[in-house]
Each structure stands twice: as structure tokens, then as C-alpha cells.
Image (tube, rainbow, N blue to C red):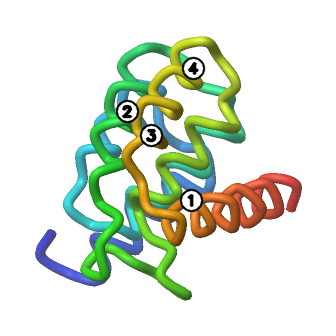
């Protein structure tokens, strides 16, 4: 991503629901955490529950380190876990619980906070 304007344009398109499901799914592969986080919010709002979304979210759960955080240590991986939980499908719960087994208590607490934050955001 070359410019802040390009980043802002992509986020605006996400927030204004101007993208197809396919485009949203592709944005989960972004290297920009701001794009990924806004995409996860839209995925939950639109209740996009296909297996490709769940696989990409499960991949994103590995990004829980300090480099990938927003505030209070909560980051992309925590929001990916929250999204998996909120999507509420058998596939998303399976991915959630497989990842949850290997986490530290601090990450579990951050995921719980991320679930609250994400639910608050989608209720608006």
C-alpha cells in the first residue's frame, strides 16, 4: 500500500459496504491491520460464514504478538478469534476451540475483551 489515501479509500469502501463478498474475503489477506480489522467487522455484520472466511480467520489467529496489537494488547489474532466465536457456526467454533487450547490466559482474556468490543461495534 503506497499511500495513506489508498488505505483510507479501502477502509471507506469496507465501511460503506461497497465491496463484494469476494473482495472482502481478499481483504482478509491484507498486510494492513487497519484493513483486516475493518474487514472482520464487516464480515460479522454481514454474517459471512463460508469456509474460506473461517480458514482465513483461523490463519489470522497466529497474530497475537505485540507487533499486531491495537490497544491494551488486543490485536488482529484476538479479533480473529472473536470473529470466529461470533460467527457461530460449527466450522468457526471448531477453529476457535482448536486455537484456544494452546493459548495463554492473558490471550484468552484479550479474546474475551475483543468479543465485547466487536459486539459493541456491530450493534453501533
Q: Nearer the viewer, residue 38 or 116?
A: 116
Circle 3 sits in a helix, a strand or a loop, which is it?
loop
Circle 1 sits in a helix, a strand or a loop, which is it?
helix
Q: Nearer the viewer, residue 87 or 7?
A: 87
Kindly give the residue lying farthest to the bottom in the view shown: 72
Expressed as whole percent of the image width and height from the top left, the position of residue 35 reads 39, 61
82 sits to left or right of 37: right
User: Going from the N terminus, do you reach mark 2 or mark 1 first?
Assistant: 2
Q: Residues within 10 Å of mark 2 (few under 14, many from 20)?
A: many
Q: Which residue is mark 3?
A: 101
74 sits to left or right of 98: right
Q: Which residue is mark 2?
A: 25
Question: Mark 1 or 4, which is nearer the eye?
Answer: 1
Kindly give the residue lying farthest to the left in the view shown: 2
Which quadrant would residue 99 be assigned to in this image?
top left
Residue at (47% x, 48% y) in the render: 80
User: Going from the N terminus, do you reach mark 3 or mark 2 first?
Assistant: 2
Residue at (51% x, 46% y) in the render: 81
Circle 2 sits in a helix, a strand or a loop, which is it?
helix
Label pair 1/4, CB-CB below 8 angstroms: no
User: Going from the N terminus, do you reach mark 2 or mark 4 first?
Assistant: 2
Q: Which residue is mark 1?
A: 108
Q: In the picture, which quadrant includes the C terminus?
A: bottom right
Q: Residues within 10 Å of mark 4 (few under 14, many from 20)?
A: some
Q: CA distance from mark 2 to mark 4?
A: 11 Å
Q: Residues within 10 Å of mark 1 (few under 14, many from 20)?
A: some
Q: CA distance from mark 3 to mark 1?
A: 10 Å
Residue at (71% x, 40% y) in the render: 45
Label pair 3/1, CB-CB below 8 angstroms: no
Question: Mark 3 or 2, which is nearer the eye?
Answer: 3
Label pair 3/2, CB-CB below 8 angstroms: no
Residue at (24% x, 53% y) in the render: 30
Amino acid at each position: 500500500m503506497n499511500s495513506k489515501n489508498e488505505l483510507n479509500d479501502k477502509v471507506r469502501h469496507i465501511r460503506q459496504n461497497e465491496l463484494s463478498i469476494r473482495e472482502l474475503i481478499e481483504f482478509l489477506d491484507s498486510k494492513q491491520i487497519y484493513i483486516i480489522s475493518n474487514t472482520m467487522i464487516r464480515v460479522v455484520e454481514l454474517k459471512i460464514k463460508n469456509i474460506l472466511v473461517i480458514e482465513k480467520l483461523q490463519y489470522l489467529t497466529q497474530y497475537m504478538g505485540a507487533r499486531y496489537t491495537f490497544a491494551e494488547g488486543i490485536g488482529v489474532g484476538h479479533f480473529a478469534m472473536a470473529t470466529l466465536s461470533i460467527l457461530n457456526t460449527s466450522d468457526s467454533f471448531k477453529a476457535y476451540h482448536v486455537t484456544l487450547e494452546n493459548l495463554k490466559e492473558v490471550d484468552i482474556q484479550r479474546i474475551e475483551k475483543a468479543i465485547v468490543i466487536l459486539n459493541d461495534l456491530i450493534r453501533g
